[in-house]
Amino acid sequence: MCLENIEEMNEKLKKTILLADDDPDVIFQVKHHLERWGYEVVAVESREEAERYLEGACPDLAILDLMMEEEDSGFILSYRIKKCRPEVPVIISTAVAAERGITFDINSPGSISWIKADHYLEKGFRMEQLRMLVNLYLD
Amino acid sequence: MKTLSILVVDDEPGIRSGIKRILAGHRVSFPFMDDDYIFDCREAASGEEAMAMLEESPPEILLLDNKLPGMDGMEVLEIIRQRKMDIMVAMITSYASLEIAAKATGDGAWDFIPKPFTPAELKASIDLITKQYFLKKIRRTMKEEGKKIRYQFLSVLSHELKSPINALEGYLQMIKDRELGESLQEYDAVLDRSLQRVDGMRTLIMDLLDFTKIRLERKDERIEHVNLSERAQMALSTIKPLAIQRNISLRYTGEETYYNADPLDLDIMLNNLLSNAVKYSHEGGSVEVSIHQVDQGLEIRVEDSGIGMSEEEISQLFKEFVRIKNSRTKGIDGSGLGLSIVSKIAELYGGHIHVKSMPEKGSEFSVILPVS
């Protein structure tokens, strides 16, 4: 097998991450790192755009900002993903919780029943933190 | 229908049962209250007995005779005051002694009922106390809501400040780790974005200062006879560089108009309205400012040929930190405070702001200021 074919195959095997965030700087930075770690990234800036993508495709992992067009865009998207593909892991990222005194704590059994997501990531996270999390779900 | 509990404290059994009988069928209803109130009376024959009942289950209203065997009414009142018990007290003074009545109302009693009283007089007193009780409840809710709003404001603010800081930190980390290679040129986009975020933060802080200036009681207010047309032209020249960049034409119409106000307030309003008009216009669009006399006073109108808004978006518009997010507003920066600042200032002068808008046609913001 020649080198080109191997690269082509690797491209095909690359796992796809849906990244939805209305902050273009978050998109730029997170996309950059995810790609460097070898993932294919579909980046969108709104729930609407994400839903259009989800109509025809399914990512291997989704990283969703909580507040986009609505205060709970991330939850809506997560719900849509889980409804048809419950095995796709979803990470919800937000800067809202801490300041508003809302603790979602997705990892507690009480919350898991209503928040249909696998992990909750507070914004301002370090990239190593994200890498560990992505590895956990995808490798 | 709601029930308020009343404790009647009097050493004369006839008075206690009389009050109970009069109030048994009494109902208080005011047009401004959602509910009617009825009453449930309990009795105590002495100050000591009253204290025991107050501790066990405090009533909303206490009808308290002053002349009691043992501990007298004034002493009971004093204890209620010291313990900050939340009870509305009306003193029953056995003879219409103004001295005791004055002392009691000074010590926290709401009302006094001179003995002997007719059923109508008793009912009138109870009506008054119920009204006060209702107002007290409203005041308490208002205070709590005020706290909630302040808390919300601060929490949203810290969120709005955190996003640019996170973005900057991320970019600095990328530069530090040479994420984009060794050549400085590769970082141009990152540096541009960082500068933009710093700019955004500055705008937010400036807007916030304007906002707190409005919120706080202002002591440095200086009202002048301001040439409004001149101010409008100044605001236009401030926004001109951005308008040129986006190829938006600016126009001013209207006669020379004067208004008595703090010139700073007028500048803040004009600058906010104009920068919105330019920001939310399509390239090549137009923005027009006009100032006219109208029936109610003076109208400052800013019209643009911009992206416009739907009815639903307009209803969200004046909330603090609300920025309309949709595909048309993508890439437009702002603090989300501008319009709430404008409407607060207008209110300060007894005026108001209203909006007409059509998606993809444009918006028209009018500030109406009454002539002082």
Image (tube, coloured by chain):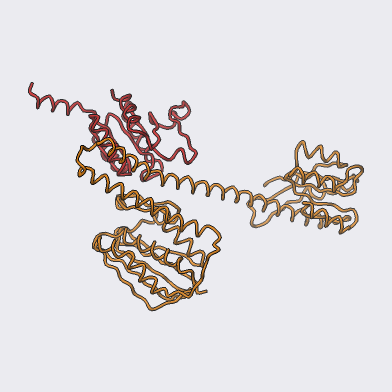
Q: How many marks?
A: 0
Identify the residue shown where x is 50% and y is 60%.
Answer: B214
Query: Is B149 displayed left or right of B16 in the figure?
Result: left
Q: Residue furthest left?
A: A2
Above or below B109: residue A99 = above
Percent from the top left, x then y, of residue B307? 30, 58
Above or below, comparing residue B149 to residue B272 in the picture: above
Answer whether residue A55 is visible to the viewer in this image.
no
**Hey, which residue is sitting farthest bottom in the picture?**
B255
- Counting from the top left corner in percent of width and height, residue A1 is at 8, 21
**Which is more toward the observer, B326 or B287?**
B287
Q: Is residue B179 visible?
A: yes
Residue A76 horizontal/vertical position (percent): 37, 38
Image coordinates of residue A41 in percent, x first then y, are 24, 35
Front in this rendered view, residue B307 or B240: B240
Q: Residue at x 85, y 47 (%)?
A: B73
Image point (34%, 36%), residue name = A64
Left or right: A100 with respect to B234? right
Q: Residue shown at 25%/64% (left/top)?
A: B244
Q: Chain B in the picture: what colour?
A: orange
Query: Color of chain A here?
Result: red
The residue nearer to you, when weighing B63 against B343, is B343
Q: Is residue A38 left or right of residue B348?
A: left
**Quarter holding residue B82:** top right
Furthest residue toward top: A1
Q: Nearer the viewer, residue B300 or A27?
A: A27
Examine the rendered structure and indicate whether residue A12 appears above or below residue B31. Answer: above
